[in-house]
Image: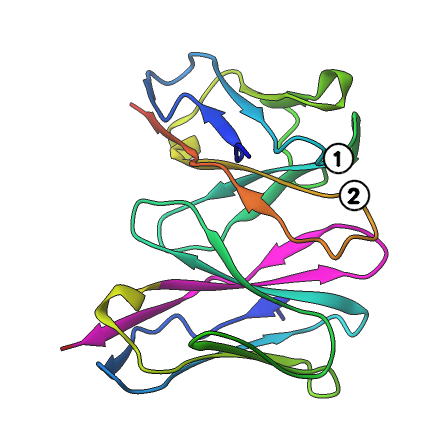
Amino acid sequence: EAGVVQSPRYKIIEKKQPVAFWCNPISGHNTLYWYLQNLGQGPELLIRYENEEAVDDSQLPKDRFSAERLKGVDSTLKIQPAELGDSAVYLCASSLGQGYGGEAFFGQGTRLTVV
Amino acid sequence: QKEVEQNSGPLSVPEGAIASLNCTYSDRVSQSFFWYRQYSGKSPELIMSIYSNGDKEDGRFTAQLNKASQYVSLLIRDSQPSDSATYLCAVNKGGGNKLTFGTGTQLKVEL
C-alpha cells in the first residue's frame, strides 16, 4: 500500500513569490494534516481536514496561507506571497477518521527555502 | 505551559544500554499517545501507540503511560547506533483527531 505522497520534495523560491505543495494521503484516510516543522522543533499543526472540511485551521496564517482538499482526497497548501520566515519543512500526514485512535502517517515532506 | 513537553537532550547512552525518553502533557482529556522517530533530514515515523495505562511492548521498544501523572515514556532496550535519532512524543486529545507534538528528544547511542 502506498504511503502519503508529497510533492515537490524541495523548493527554492524568491521572497514574495507564490508556492504550492501537494499531498496525496493514504487511501481511505479521511483525516489529513498539514504541519510545519522548523529545524530542531516538533511539527506544528497548520490545518486539519476531516474529509473535505477544514476542522482546525486556527494556526494557519490566513493572510498568506491557503489550503484546500477537494473531494476529500488530495490536498494543496499554498503560500502567497512567501516570506523569508516561511523557510521550513512542510509535512503532510493522514489518518483514519475520528474513532480510530488517531495514528497518523507522514509523507516525506517538502523542504522550502525562501531566498 | 506547553501542551506536550519533552527534554530536548541530547540524551547519550552507550550501545547496549536502555534509553529512557520522557514526555508530559497538559490536557487531562488526552486519550491517545504516540512515539515517532525522526532521523535527520527525514520525516517522522510512527513507532509506538498507546491508549491505556500501563506498558506496551513491541520488540525492543516499550511505551509506558500514566494518565494520573499525565506522563508517557519510551524505553529502548539494547540501544543500537541506528537508534540515534530524534524521538517525538505526540498526543491526541479526546473527541477528535487533533495531534499535538512535543519538540522532540535527540538520542545518541554511542559505540
How far across and down, in percent of the image, does residue A113 sit?
A: 33, 28
Pointer 1: residues within 10 angstroms few (<14), some, or many (20+)?
some
Task: Identify the element where label 2 is drawn.
Answer: loop
| Snapshot colouring | rainbow
Q: Are marks 2 and 1 in contact (CB under 8 Å)?
A: yes
Q: Which residue is mark 1?
A: A30
Q: Is residue A105 left or right of residue B85?
A: right
Residue A66 counted in the magenta span: no
Which chain is disc 1 placed on?
A: A
- Going by the numbered disc 1, the residue's amino acid type is Asn
Q: Is residue B25 left or right of residue B105?
A: right
Image vertical order of residue B52 relative to residue A79, above or below: below
Crowding near the residue tagged with mark 2, few <14, some 14–19, many ≥20 C-alpha atoms within 10 Å = some
At a point 32% along the width and 82% down the height, the residue shown is B78
Q: Is residue B37 left or right of residue A75?
A: left
Relative to A99, residue B34 above or below: below
Among the two numbered marks 2 and 1 on one chain, the one whose residue lies closer to the N terminus: 1
- Picture coordinates of residue A101 (x, y %)? 74, 57
Residue interval drawn in magenta: B86-110
Membership of B88 in magenta stretch: yes
Residue B38 x %, y %: 39, 55
Task: Name the secondary structure under disc 1.
Answer: loop
Residue A97 is marked as: 2
